[in-house]
């Protein structure tokens, strides 16, 4: 709220977006917050610093539809594709196996991979 151009509503949206993501892995992600004008983001970006907190990851071999669909980078359609592939072909061996799904672009996978795991 103390940042220039950020009121309680935008502050709440930034925090909610961070929580849904499972943490920010880059400062640029803050700019994806709904309703945050790029001009405001450019003014406040210097105030941000990434912490050492680990990102919350989704195990694509164990997660249910509800857990996956709530992630901002997956949503319902991609979650369905992941589950369908997993049910048909078995567990994913590595995150890059998601490239086998027609629903994924390379850009989406690059953006999403920090939030995924294939298990312990």
Image (cartoon, helix red, strand yellow):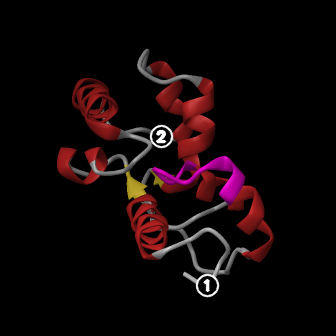
Where on the picture, by quarter, is residue 49? bottom right
Whether residue 62 can be seen here: no
Task: Say which quadrant the C terminus sits in.
Answer: bottom left
Which residue is farthest bottom?
2
Where on the picture, by quarter, is residue 82? top left
**Count of number-bearing discs:** 2
Q: Which residues are magenta?
A: 32-40
Q: Please tell me whether residue 18 is drawn above or below residue 108 in the rendered image.
A: below
Asked if residue 45 lies left or right of residue 95, the reply is right
- Name the one closer to the observer, 22 or 59: 22
Whether residue 78 can be seen here: yes
**SS label for mark 2:** loop
- 6 inside magenta stretch: no
Q: Which residue is pictured at 80% across the width and 70% down the height?
A: 46
Within-10-Å neighbours for mark 1: few <14, some 14–19, many 20+: few
Label drawn at residue 2: 1
Distance from Cα at disc 1 to Cα at disc 2: 45 Å
- 39 inside magenta stretch: yes
Instruction: Tell me residue 117's x, y (percent).
Output: 47, 54
Label drawn at residue 93: 2
Where on the picture, by quarter, is residue 15? bottom left
Q: Which residue is pictured at 39% across the width and 56% down the height?
A: 58
Which residue is farthest top?
102
- Name the one closer to the observer, 10 or 85: 10
Task: Say which quadrant the N terminus sits in.
Answer: bottom right
**SS label for mark 1:** loop
Q: Which residue is pictured at 70% across the width and 74% down the height?
A: 50
Q: Which residue is pictured at 36% across the width and 50% down the height?
A: 71
């Amino acid at each position: 709220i103390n940042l220039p151009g950020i009121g309680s509503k935008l502050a709440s949206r930034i925090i909610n977006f961070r929580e849904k993501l499972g943490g920010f892995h880059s400062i640029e992600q803050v700019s994806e917050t709904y309703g945050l004008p790029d001009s405001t983001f450019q003014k406040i970006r210097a105030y941000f610093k990434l912490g050492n907190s680990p990102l919350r990851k989704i195990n694509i071999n164990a997660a249910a539809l509800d857990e996956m669909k709530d992630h901002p980078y997956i949503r319902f359609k991609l979650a369905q594709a992941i589950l369908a592939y997993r049910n048909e072909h078995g567990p994913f061996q590595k995150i890059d196996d998601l490239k086998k799904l027609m629903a994924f672009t390379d850009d989406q996978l690059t953006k999403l991979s920090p939030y995924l795991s294939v298990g312990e």
